[in-house]
Image: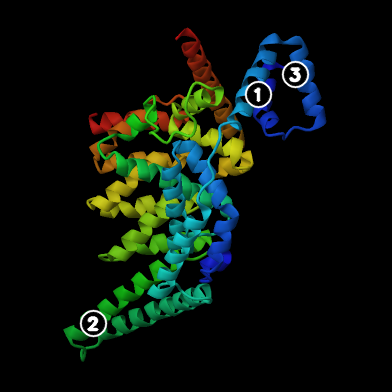
Amino acid sequence: MRCEEFSARLPDEWVGALDDTERAAMREHVGSCAACRQELESLGDTWGLLGDIPVPPPDSRALRSRLDAAIRREQESGLHAGAHGTRWNQWLLAAGVAGVALVAGLLMGRMSSPASTPNDVVALREELRDLRHMVALSLMQQQSASERLKGVGWSTRLEGPSDEVVTALIDTLRHDENVNVRLASIDALKRFADRDDVRRAALDALQNQHAPLVQMALIDFVVETQDREAAPALRRISDDTKSDQTVRTRAAWGLEHLGA
Amino acid sequence: MQAVREGDLSRLGRLFDRHHRAVYEFLVRTTGQRAVAEDLVQDVFERVLKYRSTYRGEAGFLPWLFRIASNARADHYRKLEPTMSWSDELDGEDDSAGPERLVEGASESARLQRALLALRPDKRELIVLARFSELKYEVIAELHGVDVNTIKVRVHRALKELRDKFQKLETTSHAV
């Protein structure tokens, strides 16, 4: 075993994830390499000592009772979808998609009909817009990542999306588990870059997200929106030798383009 | 969590009973303050309640829960110090863990805790996750959106940095 290989296996050694053969190979290596033996001992000691830092127990009873109160408030507010929330959501989505198709068809018919009044057309347009909002929001709540991607896509086609849609996009950027969905939400949020909550969300995400692709997209976002408040975060990424090299280069590029 | 997502909110109490200590331990070790950690545990489970519809279960409940805990901790410090930039928080030799530091004095544990709190928050979180959360490296990698070897390298580097800071504090205390 070479020293590099030994170093690479140390993290598995600390968590007890090595098998007997691997552990024996490491023991054999430290028998002939003083530097690695020293590394094994000193880092192992530090790892072990961490467990000696005392942690006072939490006041579990008080915490649980505060959570129970929050749950009661949520139940009383009637905001929860109920035991059949997911099915209801799927039904709503199917109804919404069907509704969009129906209203779009009606709208085309009315526009080509000499008997229709401008008010009819305006009313149908509004109906169509509301339905599209509903479909976008429903899709963004779906379990499947591809459905959520569609939802983010729908939101980009909305004329004058509601605050609810923008908030849903921000929630997606912050919490969605899927990188592709988070990337799509960044693109979708660019339309609203003049809003403080959107710029703040992008800056927060730049500071918290670790996926390199998402970091790159967020760097592009803050540069496109010329958000100078992002300069310290970009500098930190650019200087961080542990960050992905491509991300660091992009962050340095971002700093230049922000004039910071 | 799937049941909570679908509206059975009473099940959240059971999830709390099962996981709140792990979340608390993560937060108390990364903040060094019991009261702050308890408030953040509350915040984390209220966020679980609020954002339950965003839970997909693709990577499992614990990574999702710890992602929320990490965001809650970062948000807390941003609210606390609105004038302090993120880089200040990350780069500062954070000796300001407050009066409720878990262990005081010049003992080995006290010095190691000071060294841990002097690490950048992302490195501190990584060490605490790897050492105490019982999440496998694969899961921590998923949480950070990088591959498992990258996470192992980062844990290794963070632990080396912790050891160096710890040894420096040891030397300083002997010199005094």
Residue indicated by mark 3: A1
Which residue is at a point 44% across and 54% down the rendered structure image?
A: B42
Which residue is at a point 48% across and 13% down the rendered structure image?
A: B173
Query: Closer to us: mark 2 or mark 3?
Result: 3
Residue type at numbered disc 3 = Met
Position of A163 relative to B37 (above/below)? below
Q: Depth check: A202 or A98 in front?
A: A202
Residue type at numbered disc 2 = Ala
- Chain that bears disc 2: A
Residue indicated by mark 2: A123
Residue indicated by mark 1: A44
Residue A123 location, quadrant? bottom left
The image's colour scheme reads rainbow
Q: Secondary structure at mark 1?
A: helix
Mark 2 vs mark 3: which is more N-terminal? 3
**Marks 1 and 3: CB-CB under 8 Å?**
no
Residue farthest to the bottom? A115
**Marks 2 and 3: CB-CB under 8 Å?**
no
Q: Depth check: B160 or A253 in front?
A: B160
Q: Position of residue A45 (x, y in %)?
A: 64, 22
Q: Secondary structure at mark 2?
A: helix
Q: Position of residue B128 (x, y in %)?
A: 55, 36
Q: CA distance from mark 1 to mark 3?
A: 19 Å
